Amino acid sequence: MFTGITQTISRVVSAVKKGGGLEVSVLTPRGWRLKNGESVAVSGVCSTVMQSGRNLKFFYMPETLDKTHFAALKPGDEVNMERSLKASDRLDGHIVLGHVDTVGIIKRIKTAGESKTVTVFVPDGRRLLAPKASVALEGVSLTTAAVRGRQFTVHLIPYTWQHTNFSTKQAGDRVNVEFDILAKYLASLTRL
């Protein structure tokens, strides 16, 4: 489990198709000591460390590649990194599981004073969005400012813009979207 508070940005070293999935190596963030089997959120995707050292190695199965933009990962891409939450840690963002629901497409990025306004199109999951509710984009805990049809808008403060991979994004880019777990449970209960 994660909070959606990105701890650092890292870079993809390699992304190799293997056995129907994708084996990805990411540069180990400075000061991180991880053991094989630990969980890390990589741009919002809960990822199991297969090998640690100078690089962290992860494997993504076809289901993950279908639900995320990871099939298009390439060396040099920046990814947001967050270590898994300990029971004693503060929950500064919102509960993020690392179970990406869909891929959104950035429709526009506008400057609003010191902040950025980002509008994202989602092909499905519209009923899981509400104004002033939680959503995770690229693993970053954000609040929806507005929801219109299959588009929603979030605002990013300068700190978030500068300390996540959002500073590399532009209109047309794909982002991993995880809807709020409470919204998913409520939607599931109302279908009973």
Image (spheres, helix red, strand yellow):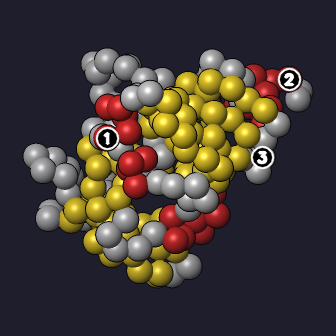
- Give me the C-alpha separation between circle 1 and circle 2: 39 Å
- Image disc number at residue 124: 3
- Please give the residue where the numbered disc 2 appears in the rendered image: 190
Is residue 63 in view from this perspective? no
Marks 3 and 2: which is nearer the front?
Answer: 3
- Give me the C-alpha separation between circle 3 and circle 2: 17 Å
Mark 3 falls on what kind of element?
loop
Which quadrant is home to the C terminus? top right
For residue 45, above or below residue 178: below
- Give me the C-alpha separation between circle 3 and circle 1: 29 Å
Marks 3 and 1: which is nearer the front?
Answer: 1
- Image disc number at residue 63: none
**Frontmost residue, 139 versus 22:** 139
Mark 2 falls on what kind of element?
helix
For residue 131, above or below residue 29: above
Three-letter amino acid code of the residue under disc 3: Asp
- Please give the residue where the numbered disc 1 appears in the rendered image: 162
In the image, is 77 to the left or to the right of 131? left
Point out the tag, 3 or 2, that comes first from the N-terminus: 3
- Percent of width and height locating residue 29: 19, 52
Point out the tag, 1 or 2, that comes first from the N-terminus: 1
Q: Residues within 10 Å of mark 1 (few under 14, many from 20)?
A: few
Residue 51 falls in image quadrant: bottom left
Q: Residues within 10 Å of mark 2 (few under 14, many from 20)?
A: few
Three-letter amino acid code of the residue under disc 2: Thr
